[in-house]
């Protein structure tokens, strides 16, 4: 009877659509308000970092937003335009770029001519000065010029193949970090720890020799740049996928600071930074942060990770309808392919993993009845 019940449970689960918090994303606007998109079908403004542990985030949900039902949504801040560009948030149109005008609080969609670019497998940065996307996909580096768009138009923007980049293996999993208008490729096979291969954007030139920045593991993970009030980024954070540490690389000083590791060790987590905070969105939907002081190494050494309490837990596409519910599986392992930072490996999350379940043809009551009747 246990075997039969397992079969019924497996066949029942096949009727569900599982959606993880990886369909959500976080970003900052130019006033360093933390924006959270795709949280339970809503979008929020959590304000600046001094408000994150109290109060309640402002609901900024409005029409025109993406459905946030893709495998992974990825957000990018265009600092000159105060716009957030969102990729991978629409499963029916995976190559489209959605634009949130943070000043007007409005959404629009920009059509894209993807050419040979694969929107299901890439890593990308948005160059600060040129407002051009650079993405590594399938062994090639691509670019897409957003000009100074704050709203989409009807003319598709093409992904242009810049050049083939050879990293020694055909399945290189890209980790791209932006600083000084240079793309820093981490996780390159054969590099010593603390090193990166550098692509100089303004000269479209891949430097032949790696650059050493101190000490961080040469492994897969996530990277995000710290902004400044003016000028280009000088520093980026790197978090290995095992969550073993938080490393801040300064490309002017060629040094690396080591901060406390994230509390949640989550290989599927994504990150975004302002000037003075690094934010983690875990795959279980929790938003956490660590404060960063660009002028005080001792302050950074003592900084700790905390939860953004003003935001709800992000469970993608949760609705109040009777045909959907959220279940908690306790501790467990979640596997998913990634996009945006799309080449990552699957892994487990600490603590309870929230999964949103949408019933397609039967109700939750029917599922429960089918399952219990087998014992």
Image (spheres, rainbow, N blue to C red):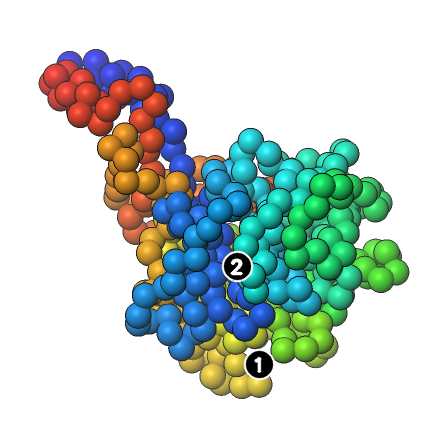
- Residue 285 seen from this side: yes
Mark 2–mark 1 distance (CA, rounded to whole Å): 30 Å
Which residue is tagged 1? 294
Quarter holding the C terminus is: top left
Crowding at dot 2, Cα within 10 Å, few <14 / some 14-19 / many 20+, comes out as: few
**Residue, x 27% and y 16% (percent of image)?**
7
Q: Position of residue 113 (x, y in %)?
A: 74, 37
Q: Position of residue 200 (x, y in %)?
A: 82, 61
Q: Quadrant of residue 53?
A: bottom left
Q: Secondary structure at mark 1?
A: loop
Q: Position of residue 262 (x, y in %)?
A: 42, 63
Q: Is residue 297 shown above or below 199?
A: below
Crowding at dot 1, Cα within 10 Å, few <14 / some 14-19 / many 20+, comes out as: some
Q: Position of residue 370 (x, y in %)?
A: 18, 18
Could you tell whether 373 is left or right of 33 in the image? left
Q: Secondary structure at mark 2?
A: loop
Could you tell whether 73 is left or right of 316 in the image? right
**Residue, x 39% and y 45% (percent of image)?**
41
Name the N-terminal-most of marks 2 and 1.
2
Which residue is tagged 2? 105
- Residue 189 seen from this side: no
**Residue, x 57% and y 65% (percent of image)?**
103
Q: Nearer the viewer, mark 2 or mark 1?
A: 2
């Amino acid at each position: 009877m246990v075997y039969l019940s397992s079969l019924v449970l497996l066949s029942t689960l096949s009727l569900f659509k599982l959606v993880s918090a990886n369909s959500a994303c976080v970003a900052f606007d130019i006033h360093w308000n933390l924006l959270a998109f795709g949280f339970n079908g809503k979008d929020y403004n959590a304000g600046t970092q001094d408000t994150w542990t109290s109060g309640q985030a402002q609901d900024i949900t409005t029409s025109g937003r993406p459905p946030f039902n893709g495998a992974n949504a990825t957000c990018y801040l265009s600092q000159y335009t105060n716009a957030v560009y969102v990729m991978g948030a629409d499963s029916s149109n995976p190559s489209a770029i959605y634009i949130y005008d943070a000043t007007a609080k409005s959404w629009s969609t920009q059509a894209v001519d993807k050419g040979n670019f694969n929107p299901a497998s890439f890593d990308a940065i948005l160059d600060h000065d040129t407002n051009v996307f650079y993405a590594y996909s399938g062994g090639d580096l691509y670019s897409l010029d957003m000009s100074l768009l704050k709203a989409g138009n009807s003319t598709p923007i093409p992904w242009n193949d810049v050049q083939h980049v050879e990293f020694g293996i055909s399945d290189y999993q890209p980790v791209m970090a932006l600083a000084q208008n240079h793309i820093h490729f981490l996780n390159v096979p054969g590099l010593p720890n603390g090193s990166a291969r550098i692509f100089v954007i303004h000269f479209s030139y891949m430097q032949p020799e790696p650059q050493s920045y101190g000490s961080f593991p040469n492994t897969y993970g996530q990277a995000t740049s710290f902004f400044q009030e003016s000028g280009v980024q000088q520093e980026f954070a790197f978090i290995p996928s095992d969550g073993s540490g938080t490393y801040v690389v300064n490309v002017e000083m060629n040094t690396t600071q080591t901060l406390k590791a994230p509390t949640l060790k989550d290989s599927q987590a994504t990150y975004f930074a302002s000037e003075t905070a690094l934010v983690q969105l875990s795959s279980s939907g929790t938003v956490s942060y660590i404060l960063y002081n660009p002028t005080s190494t001792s302050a950074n050494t003592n900084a700790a990770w905390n939860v953004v309490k003003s935001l709800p837990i992000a469970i993608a596409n949760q609705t109040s309808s009777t045909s959907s519910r959220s279940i908690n599986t306790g501790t467990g392992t979640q596997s998913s392919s990634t996009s945006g930072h799309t080449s990552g490996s699957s892994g487990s999350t600490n603590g309870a993993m929230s999964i949103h379940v949408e019933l397609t043809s039967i109700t939750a009551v029917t599922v429960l009845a089918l399952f219990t009747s087998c014992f």
